[in-house]
Image: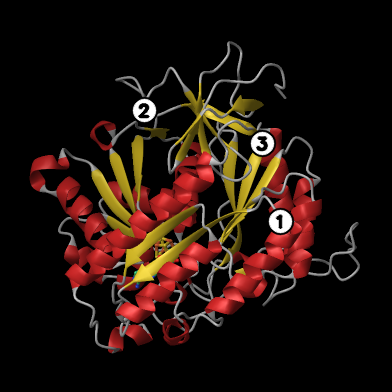
């Protein structure tokens, strides 16, 4: 991206693994370093500084990041570059992260990202390697830097997680739950809308716990619609920000699917008709051992509550196969739940024991090939279910927030419906990212919808 002879502090490339929170952190790091005088490289080959943002949620995610770090920091590929790791794996492993990658220049945990400009300076001055995993309970206000440009943005509203599901490393690496004050979230969203952002996704590991462990509104603040719960109040306040067209929030938990949240999703303009609501399993026995805090029936009741308020609600979910003790019968209950819930899309994961979690002390007794088989069966089931839901949209006209040229074929554009479905269409001249257009759906795949622009209706 930069020209030879560029006088900036250096060219940075950030490679991201893991969830949307990591994507958000990577963007914030990039923006922070640009502010400090660095430029962004298009790929690692063109970078002087490569930062790998790591994920710890499954062993495979860690292995991938370690493999990447080893590859770029090897003598053969190094070419004088500074190589560092950030994110959850650093928090989990601390100094051991550097032991696993020879020649790593720095390792900085998720709560210490604001120190990166100083850390890189210090490495350049020969004071590396620098290890700063940090304390997940400290430095709670997240970075609020954003890169200019796109029509959509992520905004952190809730850090950490207190749910302690028995398989999950997240509470151990991201610390205890802490909610950002509403005013601070609003400042960030107002700045984004001022830069041309049209859609924000409010992020939290368990976003419906927003405002549960610390107050986020002044005692005398009132909600115009009379909401009393913190998340509906935030959705209402964010929707009032001028210029913003759409609001999403993720990830959900059935316990938070209150009637008031349903009302907010139905009544607050711009709140999207989509929810990512991880179920993890359809077996009550497994759910109990996972410490999820609901039964399959509770989950379906939560879904029914929201669908009563928003009949067009699209639902996506996460499922783990091969949790310790999961029998064929438990697995079939997950298949049945998928059928009952009618998910639009599902992410399926093979259980991976994480050291330090309760489940890691139980026998990982579903063999890997059986986990693989269950994974494939669910993928096939979901392809069928998702395709049927998408095919029902053929012949309808949907509103799409245009995001930009499609990655596969740049002559076409991609965008999303309020239900978070990807739509591919031919742009018309003058179309800008962030415009909302009408697309007549004439073809559907399990993950994507296609069709021509309908006349008029460009907003
Ligand atoms: N093994 C497999 N999948 C996991 N997830 C979280 N922890 C594990 C684990 N130990 C999945 C859950 C979660 C998603 C982000 O990752 O389904 O919702
Ligand atoms: Fe995100 Fe969890 Fe992975 Fe960290 S460990 S990047 S919080 S999914």
Residue that mark 3 sits on: 198
Relative depth, front residue between 210 and 313: 313
Q: Nearer the viewer, mark 2 or mark 1?
A: 2
**Image coords of residue 214 (percent x, y):** 70, 75
Relative depth, front residue between 118 and 210: 210
**Does residue 265 show up?**
yes
Looking at the picture, does residue 313 appear above or below residue 31? Answer: below
Q: Would residue 183 appear left or right of 106 to someone viewing this image?
A: right
What distance separates the C-alpha of mark 1 from that of mark 3? Answer: 19 Å
Residue that mark 1 sits on: 184
Indicate which disc residue 231 carries. none
**Image coords of residue 199 (percent x, y):** 64, 40
Looking at the picture, does residue 9 appear above or below residue 344? Answer: above
Q: How crowded is the residue under tag 2: few (<14 C-alpha within 10 Å), some, or many (20+)?
A: few
Label 2 SS: loop
**Image quarter (top left, top right, bottom left or bottom right) of the C terminus:** top right
Label 3 SS: loop
Residue 234 falls in which quadrant of the image?
bottom right
Q: Would residue 164 appear left or right of 259 to someone viewing this image?
A: left
- Tell me the residue at 47%/49% (across/down): 386
Q: Nearer the viewer, mark 1 or mark 3?
A: 3
Q: How crowded is the residue under tag 1: few (<14 C-alpha within 10 Å), some, or many (20+)?
A: some
Relative depth, front residue between 423 and 49: 423
Label 1 SS: helix
Q: Earlier in the sequence, mark 2 or mark 1?
A: 1
- Tell me the residue at 36%/74% (across/down): 331
**Image coords of residue 456 (percent x, y):** 71, 17
Indicate which disc residue 408 carries. 2
Q: How crowded is the residue under tag 3: few (<14 C-alpha within 10 Å), some, or many (20+)?
A: many
Q: Quadrant of ligand 1?
A: bottom left
Q: Would residue 240 appear left or right of 317 to someone viewing this image?
A: right
What distance separates the C-alpha of mark 2 from that of mark 1? Answer: 38 Å
């Amino acid at each position: 991206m930069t020209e030879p002879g560029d006088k900036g502090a250096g060219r940075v490339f950030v490679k991201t693994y893991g969830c949307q929170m990591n994507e958000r952190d990577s963007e914030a790091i990039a923006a922070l370093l640009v502010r400090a005088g660095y430029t962004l490289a298009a790929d690692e080959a063109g970078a002087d500084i490569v930062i790998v943002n790591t994920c710890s949620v499954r062993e495979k995610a860690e292995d991938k990041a370690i493999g990447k770090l080893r590859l770029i920091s090897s003598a053969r590929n190094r070419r004088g570059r500074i190589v560092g790791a950030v994110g959850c794996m650093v928090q989990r492993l601390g100094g051991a992260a550097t032991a696993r990658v020879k020649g790593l220049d720095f390792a900085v945990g998720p709560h210490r990202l604001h120190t990166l400009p100083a850390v890189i300076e210090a490495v350049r001055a020969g004071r590396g390697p620098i290890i700063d995993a940090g304390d997940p309970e400290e430095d709670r206000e997240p970075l609020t830097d954003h890169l200019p440009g796109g029509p959509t943005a992520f905004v952190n509203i809730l850090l950490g997680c207190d749910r302690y599901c028995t398989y999950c490393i997240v509470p151990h690496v991201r610390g205890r739950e802490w909610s950002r004050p509403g005013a601070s979230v609003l400042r960030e969203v107002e700045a984004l809308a001022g830069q041309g952002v049209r859609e924000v996704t409010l992020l939290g590991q368990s976003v419906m716990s927003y405002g549960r462990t610390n107050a986020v509104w002044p005692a005398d603040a009132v909600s115009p619609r009379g909401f009393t719960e913190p998340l509906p109040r935030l959705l209402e306040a964010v929707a009032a920000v001028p210029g913003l067209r759409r609001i999403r929030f993720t990830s959900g938990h059935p316990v938070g699917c209150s009637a008031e949240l349903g009302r907010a999703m139905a009544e607050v303009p711009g709140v999207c008709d989509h929810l990512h609501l991880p179920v993890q399993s359809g077996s009550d026995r497994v759910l109990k051992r996972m410490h999820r805090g609901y039964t399959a029936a509770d989950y379906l009741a939560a879904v029914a509550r929201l669908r009563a308020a928003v009949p067009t609600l699209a639902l996506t979910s996460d499922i783990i196969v091969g949790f310790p003790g999961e029998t064929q019968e438990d697995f079939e209950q997950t298949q049945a739940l998928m059928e009952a819930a009618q998910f639009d899309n599902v992410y399926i994961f093979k259980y991976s024991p994480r050291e330090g979690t309760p489940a890691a002390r139980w026998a990982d007794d579903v063999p890997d090939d059986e986990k693989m088989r269950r994974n494939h069966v669910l993928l096939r089931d979901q392809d069928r279910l998702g395709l049927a839901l998408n095919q029902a949209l053929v012949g309808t006209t949907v509103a799409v927030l245009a995001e930009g040229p499609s990655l596969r074929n740049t002559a076409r554009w991609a965008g999303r419906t309020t239900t978070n479905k990807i739509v591919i269409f031919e742009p018309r001249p003058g179309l800008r990212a962030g415009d909302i257009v009408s697309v007549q759906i004439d073809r559907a795949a399990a993950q994507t919808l296609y069709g021509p622009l309908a006349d008029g209706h460009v907003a």
